[in-house]
């Protein structure tokens, strides 16, 4: 792995004649600077990974799926087949497939927008227990501030009602899910290699 970026605007070294960054965390030809990463806000446009390029150390709890590919998840002890809507990394949460992308070494939740564009709109929720490897300059506090909050569904008893922020420390694990809610760790001051949780239980990983 190459060194993390300095504050200069020099491009990252690439294999001769290919114009491809040697650091898996940078998929664009121009490498960002520490200054640009420090002011990165959500949401921003991205392109989902078309291939499984994130090292296994940082992708233990996700699966790279091709659009239309089937994957079997377990919900309440039952096997349910889901289809990936587009090619990307996915995690299973409460029986739903969450599309993800790793940008600059950080996991984000993404969505498909009009015009066949994709946007990172939220830091991957801590309950997914994903491991980051952020480039130097990433500002987690700023990303958390501009990240779309996780909200509860409106109550059926009272309408209308505003969604309220989800307290993830109070969520009961959904029996049979591949991934479970746990008490999230604070990610305000991540280390160079940032893990948002303890090591995953191999029994929780998708087959």
Image (tube, rainbow, N blue to C red):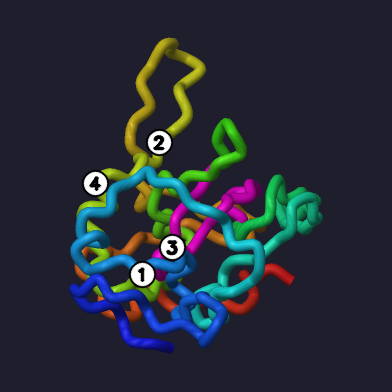
**Nearer mark to the viewer, of 1 and 3:** 1
Give the CA distance from mark 2 to mark 3. Answer: 24 Å
Secondary element under disc 4, as helix, strand or loop, is helix
Residue 145 disc label:
4
Q: Residue under circle 3?
A: 103
In the depicted view, which residue is nearer to us: 51 or 195? 51
Q: Residue drawn at (35%, 40%), measured in percent from left and top?
A: 149
Question: In which quarter of the view is residue 207 placed?
Answer: bottom right
Of the image marks 1 and 3, the number of the one nearer the N terminus: 1
How far across and down, in percent of the image, does residue 135 sit? 32, 73
**Nearer mark to the viewer, of 1 and 4:** 1
Give the residues in magenta. 92-111
Of the image marks 1 and 4, the number of the one nearer the N terminus: 1
Question: In which quarter of the view is residue 141 placed?
Answer: bottom left
Give the CA distance from mark 1 to mark 4. Answer: 24 Å
Give the CA distance from mark 2 to mark 4. Answer: 15 Å
Residue 31 disc label:
1
Q: Residue under circle 2?
A: 151
Residue 190 visible in the displayed image: no
Q: Residue drawn at (43%, 63%), measured in percent from left and top?
A: 103
Of the image marks 4 and 3, the number of the one nearer the N terminus: 3
For residue 35, side relative to residue 57 (left or right): left
């Amino acid at each position: 792995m190459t060194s993390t970026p300095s504050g200069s605007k020099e491009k990252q070294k690439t294999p001769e004649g290919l114009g491809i960054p040697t650091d898996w965390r940078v998929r664009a030809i121009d490498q960002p600077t520490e200054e640009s990463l420090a002011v990165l806000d959500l949401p921003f446009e991205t392109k989902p990974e078309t291939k499984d390029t994130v090292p296994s150390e940082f992708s233990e709890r996700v699966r790279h799926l091709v659009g239309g590919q089937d994957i079997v998840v377990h919900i309440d002890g039952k096997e349910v087949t889901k289809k990936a809507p587009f090619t990307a990394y996915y995690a299973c949460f409460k029986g739903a497939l969450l599309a993800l992308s790793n940008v600059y070494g950080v996991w984000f939740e993404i969505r498909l927008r009009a015009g066949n564009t994709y946007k990172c709109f939220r830091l991957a929720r801590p309950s997914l227990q994903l491991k980051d490897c952020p480039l130097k300059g990433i500002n987690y506090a700023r990303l958390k501030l501009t990240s779309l909050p996780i909200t509860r569904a409106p109550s059926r008893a009272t309408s209308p009602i505003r969604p309220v922020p989800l307290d993830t420390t109070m969520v009961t694990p959904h029996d049979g899910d591949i991934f479970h809610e746990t008490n999230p760790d604070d990610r305000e001051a991540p280390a160079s290699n940032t893990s948002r949780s303890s090591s995953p239980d191999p029994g929780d990983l998708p087959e």
